[in-house]
Amino acid sequence: MNPPLPITPEEDPVQVVDEWLKEATQKGIQRHPNSMTLATVNTSGQPSARVVLLKDLSVNKGFGVFYTHYGSKKGIDISNNSTVSAVMHWDQLGKQVRLEGEAVRSPAKESNEYFMTRPWHSQLNAWVSEQSKSLANPIDLVRRAKDKARDLKLPDPTDIAFNGLDLNKSCIPRPPFWGGYRLWFAAIELWTEGAGRFHNRIRYERTLSPIDAYTFQASDWKSGYLQP
Ligand SMILES: Cc1cc2nc3c(=O)[nH]c(=O)nc-3n(C[C@H](O)[C@H](O)[C@H](O)COP(=O)(O)O)c2cc1C
């Protein structure tokens, strides 16, 4: 039989996600322990999934933050349908988290603060990559990066890219079309691997009511076990 589930329906599921994320990070089991597969749906109902990095988790309020290009495919999907889902999986821990909820843009101040922490090549890339648009030739992107660097009075990125030179991160402002999304959790499923496929599953649900462009009021969690 299974050992008892170390979590119960009474727990705050966001707190548990935070603990699992910390455990995965501390154990160094994955290069990107904060990676999550984010699924969006387009206007025809076609789902689409891709990996993004969960960069922040607000345990108190119950949302996670990822960063991307607002004009990317996922950005366009979200602008038409903000209801998304995501999954995180740590194979060596035998743990999975399923997330469902509403994605809304982060306040500009928060996106600015995060952007400032990024390496300058990543900042430059945010300016020049029209994420998800077609690209006739990858060399065009390099040309655009060199041009943008010249506009911003920065060194030629192709000269410096490989010699590790660091620049003052505030040299490059955040592009208005790039920033964070808060994923407000309306449902969370915690899954732990059990022996003989007697896996443990608890689903937590709550209702979200919008307060402003960035914030939801959340009801208390309702929860219960699911069959494996
Ligand atoms: C480990 C990993 C982490 C990634 N993190 C991000 C991320 O945080 N933000 C992002 O926009 N794309 C990230 N990507 C790239 C996306 O998976 C995807 O290719 C890109 O966002 C374009 O997706 P879209 O065309 O569906 O919008 C990551 C990919 C991998 C494999």
Image (tube, rainbow, N blue to C red):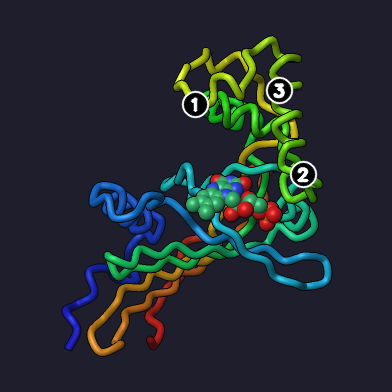
Q: Is mark 1 on a helix, strand or loop?
A: loop
Q: From mark 2 to mark 1, how far is it between C-alphas? A: 22 Å
Q: From mark 1 to mark 3, how far is it between C-alphas? A: 15 Å
The answer to which of 59 and 71 lies nearer the viewer is 71
Q: Is mark 2 on a helix, strand or loop?
A: loop
Query: Which image quadrant is residue 115 in?
Result: top right
Earlier sequence position, callout 1 versus callout 3: 3
Earlier sequence position, callout 2 versus callout 1: 2
**Residue 85, image x and y in percent?**
59, 64
For label 2, the residue is: 137
**Residue 218, image x and y in percent?**
55, 55
Q: Residue 146 carries which label?
A: 3
Q: What residue type is labelled 2?
A: Asn
Crowding at dot 1, Cα within 10 Å, few <14 / some 14-19 / many 20+, comes out as few
Q: What residue type is labelled 3?
A: Lys
For label 1, the residue is: 162
Crowding at dot 2, Cα within 10 Å, few <14 / some 14-19 / many 20+, comes out as few
* Side (left or right) of 7 relative to 105: left
The answer to which of 75 and 103 lies nearer the viewer is 75
